[in-house]
Image: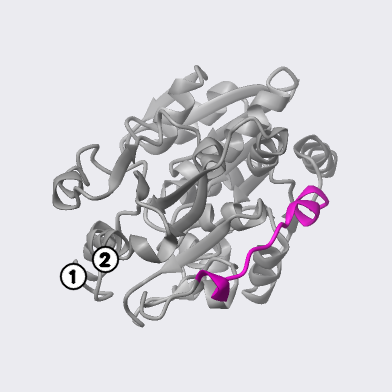
Amino acid sequence: MLKIASFFNDSGPSNNLLSIVKKYEKEYVWYFFVYKNSPAFKIFQNAKLPIIEIDENSNITDKLKKISADIVLVGTSWQNKTHLEFIKIAKALHIPSIAFLEHWVNYRERFGYPQEFWKENLADFTTLNDEYGYEMAKDLGFSNIIKLRFDNLLDDIKIFEMGKIEERNSLLFISEPTKKVAYTTFGDENYWGFDEFRVCEEICKNMDNFSTSHLTIRLHPSDETQKYDYLIQKYPNLNIEIENPYETPLIESLCKNKIIIGIDGFVLFEAMAIGKLSISFMPSLKRECVVPIFKQNKITTFENLKLADFKTKNSLKEIKSFGIDFASMVKKIANEKK
């Protein structure tokens, strides 16, 4: 039985890996290397997967040798670079490595760009889960790209199509740590001219434009749980609900809300894919939404807003037909190794 070792940190790729593991749990021997209290740690722990905790001082080489891994999977991040260490060690041990790419942003930066030799940091194979991301990776010079089925999104689509979660006339705001990321990256909390608090308050002030007074704020996995509690007192005319992402599945949240507004991020793509009205709102021109949703759904102001100006799209057919399944990919790579 093939042994698959993985290192994941961020929530997006971790959730996708979890969907894959649920489908193929008994077909491979799995090992999950994670930093304690990372989004991946919480996701895998909640799923009762056999976690192997590591830290900056861990001897990854010895750990991979000890388990005799046949394949190494890594989730990529543009802030945490430990996946590069796993790729480097896998190459030294002649173990095929596969990097999961998602979210349409900083593809090269995850592997050390703008350093001249960033391509040397690439895994043996790179997976993409949608056509837009695949073409983007090709244009940026990636090689050995595999179109992989998006199991996590496909699982969510099944739940959506069952129709058991009733939609209500409410708006969902997808939070992100804009302020923290701007400071970490640029040393300036207001680098883009806005943060997540301003975005959320602008939404609160303009709820009439959406013909509802019900606002759900879905916290980011790294958000503090009390982050937006002050808004409940500040806007007593609104029915504001704060949602914990570790307690409420994303697809449940998307199904029960009519309109989805965020700054950037994969959730806007998933919302559009299932036919929801998906809007990116950034009150500044210093940052651009990278998610492949309709251009007219990317706005910088609520002035003269008309819901009829936005577009919706159901992309279920394209998503279901994209890529090969995980088992086929593993078989292909294992055969190449021989």
Q: Residues within 10 Å of mark 2 (few under 14, many from 20)?
A: some
How far from the left and from the top, in percent, is residue 306? Answer: 48, 74
Q: Secondary structure at mark 1?
A: loop
Judge by depth and name the residue closer to the eye, 299 or 5: 299
Q: Nearer the viewer, residue 291 or 57?
A: 291
Q: Which residues are magenta?
A: 307-322
**Residue sitting at x 56%, y 63%:** 120
Relative image position of residue 266 (x, y in whole percent): 53, 55
Amino acid type, mark 1: Asp
**Viewer-side residue, 51 vs 163:** 163
Q: How is the image coloured?
A: one colour
Please provide percent x and percent y for residue 278: 53, 60
- In reply to whether residue 321 is colored magenta, the answer given is yes
158 inside magenta stretch: no
Return the residue at label 1: 188
Residue nearest the observer in this picture, 143 or 59: 143
Q: Which comes sooner in the sequence, label 1 or label 2? A: 2
Give the quarter of the figure containing the N terminus. Answer: top right
As helix, strand or loop, the secondary structure at mark 2 comes to helix
Q: Is residue 181 visible?
A: yes
Q: Amino acid at mark 2?
A: Ala
Q: Position of residue 182 (x, y in %)?
A: 26, 65
Q: Which residue is mark 2?
A: 182
Is residue 126 in view?
Answer: no
Within-10-Å neighbours for mark 1: few <14, some 14–19, many 20+ = some
